Image (cartoon, helix red, strand yellow):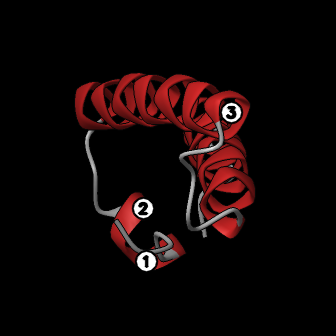
Amino acid sequence: MAEMKTSDIRAMSPDQMDDAVLNLKKERFNLRFQRATGQLENTSRLREARRDIARIKTIAAQKRDGKSK
C-alpha cells in the first residue's frame, strides 16, 4: 500500500476513515512482528504506516471541528 494522499483522505467518509485507520494499525502490528523476526524487507513501510495513521486522524479531527479546507 502506497502513502495515502490528503485529497484521497478528505474524500473519505468518517466511517471509511475509521476503517482505514483500523487496517493501517493491523498492518503496522504485522510489520512490527516481521521486523522482530527479521522477515521485514521494506523497513520504511513502518514509518509510512505510522504517518498515514496520523494523517487520517488529523484530517478527521479537522472535519469534526469544521476546519476543513
Is residue 15 shown left or right of residue 34? Answer: left
Task: Tell me which corner region of the image, top left, top right, bottom left or bottom right, holds residue 61.
Answer: top right
| Mark 2 residue type | Arg
In percent of width and height, residue 11 lies at 29, 62
Question: In the image, is residue 34 above or below residue 58?
Answer: above
Near mark 3 (Cα within 10 A), the count class, few <14, some 14-19 or many ≥20, is: few
Q: Which residue is mark 1?
A: 7
Q: Disc 3 designates what residue?
A: 65
Looking at the rendered structure, the number of numbered marks drawn on it comes to 3
- Label 2 and label 1: CA atoms lie apart by 5 Å
Q: Which residue is mark 2?
A: 10
The image quarter containing residue 26 is top left
Report the residue at 54% width, 46% height from top: 39
- Discs 2, 1 touching: Cβ within 8 Å: yes
Give the x, y percent position of residue 30: 47, 28
Disc 1 residue type (three-letter):
Ser
* C-beta proximity under 8 Å, tags 3 and 2: no
Q: Nearer the viewer, residue 47 or 20?
A: 47
Identity of the residue drawn at 34% across and 30% down? 23
Q: Are marks 1 and 3 in contact (CB under 8 Å)?
A: no
Q: Position of residue 58 (x, y in %)?
A: 71, 44
Please give the name of the residue rendered at 59% of the width and 58% of the height, measured from the top-left corner. Answer: 68
Q: Give the residue type that dot 3 points to.
A: Asp
Above or below for 50 versus 5: above
Q: Return the disc, 1 or 3, that comes first in the chain's sequence.
A: 1
Element marked by disc 1: helix
For label 2, the crowd category at 10 Å Cα-Cα, with few meaning under 14, some 14 to 19 and many 20 or more, is some
